[in-house]
Image (spheres, helix red, strand yellow):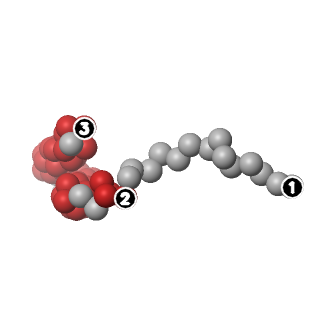
Amino acid sequence: MDLDNSNIRHHHQPEEKAHDGSLKLRNLLNIIFMIGAVAGVALYFLVSQTIGTIVILAAIVFKIIECCIRFFH
């Protein structure tokens, strides 16, 4: 079976844009968000709902910053 892949559109960024400095910053912000979200959920269930909620909201701030960089860059 021979597949014709000439009509498939790939949604990859150009190579020069993929190595931009903002990608490293966005990845760092995403890592901070993920760690904060996991820690917040753990604190929510194990320690205090109030503290867990505050940590989760603080993690969301990092995600919002990352999204703004992605949208405006």
Q: Report the residue marked by disc 2.
A: 15
- C-alpha separation, residue under disc 2 versus residue under disc 1: 32 Å
Q: Report the residue marked by disc 3.
A: 71
- C-alpha separation, residue under disc 3 versus residue under disc 2: 19 Å
For marks 1 and 3 on the same chain, the one whose residue lies earlier in the sequence: 1
- C-alpha separation, residue under disc 1 versus residue under disc 3: 41 Å
Mark 1 vs mark 3, foreground winner is: 1
Q: Residue at x 19, y 59 (%)?
A: 21
Q: Residue at x 20, y 55 (%)?
A: 22
- Label 1: state its secondary structure: loop
Q: Report the residue marked by disc 1.
A: 1
For marks 3 and 2 on the same chain, the one whose residue lies earlier in the sequence: 2
Q: Position of residue 2 (x, y in %)?
A: 82, 54
Q: Amino acid at mark 3?
A: Phe
Mark 2 vs mark 1, foreground winner is: 2
Is residue 11 visible to the viewer in this orientation of the structure?
A: yes
